[in-house]
Amino acid sequence: MPRPTAAQLAYGSATVVVSTIAMLLLSQTSTGIGVAVISAAALGLGLLVALTVPIPRRRGRHAAGRPADAAAVTADETAAARVPEPRAAAADHPVHH
C-alpha cells in the first residue's frame, strides 16, 4: 500500500475534526455512546475523504514525451525517435572569413 501524501493527510484530518465538531454540536449528545458513534462516523468520513483525494502523477523529463497510451508505441517508432536528424553538408553553410 502506498504511503499517503501530505494532501491526503491534511484533508482527512481536517474532515475528521470539522465533522466531529459539527455533528456533536448538531446532535447535542452528551452520552458516551453518542460521542463514540459520532467519532466513529467522523473517522470513517475522514478516511473516505483521504482516499478520494487525487494522487498527483509524477512529472519528469520522461513523462512529458510519453503518449497517453504507452502500449500503442511500437519499437519502430521508438527507434525512429532516437535517430538524430542528418547534419547539413559543409557546402550548405559556407564559412566567410
Image (tube, grey):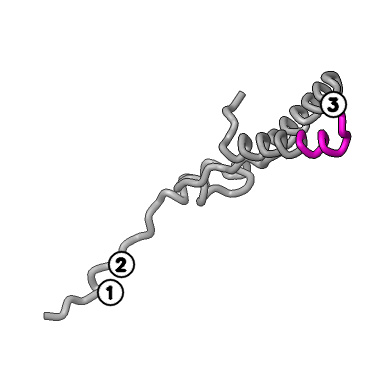
At 47% from the left and 50% from the top, the residue drawn is: 80
Q: Residues within 10 Å of mark 3 (few under 14, many from 20)?
A: few
Residue 88 image-quadrant placement: bottom left
Is the N terminus in the top left, top right, bottom left or bottom right quadrant? top right
**What residue span does the magenta drawing correspond to?**
20-29
Residue 97 image-quadrant placement: bottom left
Give the CA distance from mark 1 to mark 2. Answer: 6 Å
Residue 25 image-quadrant placement: top right
Would you say the residues marked 3 and 1 are in contact, meaning their CB atoms lie under 8 Å apart? Answer: no
Q: Secondary structure at mark 2?
A: loop
Q: Residues within 10 Å of mark 1 (few under 14, many from 20)?
A: few
Residue farthest front in this picture: 30
Would you say the residues marked 1 and 2 are in contact, meaning their CB atoms lie under 8 Å apart? Answer: yes
Counting from the top left corner in percent of width and height, residue 18 is at 73, 39
Kind of residue sitting beneath label 1: Asp
At 17% from the left and 76% from the top, the residue drawn is: 95
At 28% from the left and 74% from the top, the residue drawn is: 92
Q: Secondary structure at mark 1?
A: helix
Would you say the residues marked 3 and 2 are in contact, meaning their CB atoms lie under 8 Å apart? Answer: no
Residue farthest top in this picture: 33
- Report the label total: 3
Upstream in sequence: badge 3 or badge 2: 3
Give the CA distance from mark 3 to mark 2. Answer: 84 Å
Residue on which disc 2 sits: 88
Q: Is residue 42 above or below residue 33?
A: below
Residue on which disc 3 sits: 30
Upstream in sequence: badge 3 or badge 1: 3
Q: Residues within 10 Å of mark 2 (few under 14, many from 20)?
A: few
**Which label sits in the foreground, 3 or 2?**
3
Counting from the top left corner in percent of width and height, residue 62 is at 47, 45
Counting from the top left corner in percent of width and height, residue 8 is at 63, 37
Residue on which disc 1 sits: 92
